[in-house]
Amino acid sequence: MQNEVIETVRGLIRQSRQIVFFGGAGVSTASNIPDFRSSDGLYNRVQQSAYSTEEMLSHDFLVSQPELFFQNLRENLIFPDAKPNAAHIALARLERLGRLQGIVTQNIDGLHQKAGSENVIELHGNIARFYCTACGRPYPLADIMKSERAPRCSVCRGSIRPDVVLYQEMLDGDVLQAAVDLISAADVLIVGGTSLVVYPAAGLLQHYCGNKLVLINRDPTPYDSQADYLIQGNIAEILTELMDGVD
């Protein structure tokens, strides 16, 4: 049955030039970046800490415990040697073919861009970017990795933070609107590698107006019953299979 669904979706991809992909942490697990909510994900790791993962990734924790915040960031959120996997490469190829109009991602790893994708909307920012909260001066990841403490601005000594959305913070309104506009215009929406439980990101699916919603995930999601085409399994393998013969 699943082979028939894959063949049907492959046909949709061949016919469409208005595809949008919406993805989450599962897209990057094949690049050895752990996801958050699976059995071996970041939230379920045994940590030698009195704080939960949510606390350590919150705005309040950044302000009150900057040293521990950056220690956790370096140990669990930054993967400078990670490389794009087959999922990223398949999506970049689909964009080059003029069929994929853009990617909306919950990920902060920048691997879609490293694979060659150009129109990437990063809902939660990018862990490779940092900036001073006082003067706005940007800082590259390399500078943060060289420091063993919470980094300070070399110009004004202000606090430096990652350009990502932390717990207790709102998504950027312009970024969110760009994602809504992209998804609203899609004829085929492919959703993959996301548990679809984080809002407002998961709510973006409500803006899709078509009848070709393709949901690819290893585990069940709250939106499975709403999918027109449901495919379960490894997203890197499935996207590669879906691209077979597409040109």
Image (cartoon, rainbow, N blue to C red):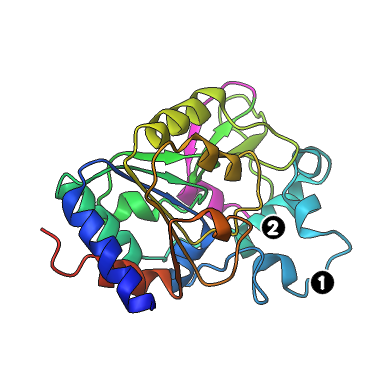
Residue at 58% x, 42% y is 201
Q: Is residue 30 located in the magenta-colored stretch of the structure?
A: no
The quadrant in which residue 38 appears is bottom right
- x and y percentages locating residue 245 in the rendered image: 13, 67
Relative depth, front residue between 125 and 245: 245
Image disc number at residue 199: none
Residue at 45% x, 62% y is 27
Relative to residue 237, is residue 178 drawn left or right? right
Residue linked to disc 1: 48
Q: Which residues are magenta?
A: 134-148
Q: Is residue 143 located in the magenta-colored stretch of the structure?
A: yes
Q: Which class describes the residues within 10 Å of circle 2: few (<14), some (14-19), or many (20+)?
A: some
Residue linked to disc 2: 71
In the picture, the quarter occupied by the N terminus is bottom left
Q: Which class describes the residues within 10 Å of circle 1: few (<14), some (14-19), or many (20+)?
A: few
- Under circle 2, the secondary element is helix
- Under circle 1, the secondary element is loop
**Label 1, label 2: how many angstroms apart (C-alpha)?**
12 Å
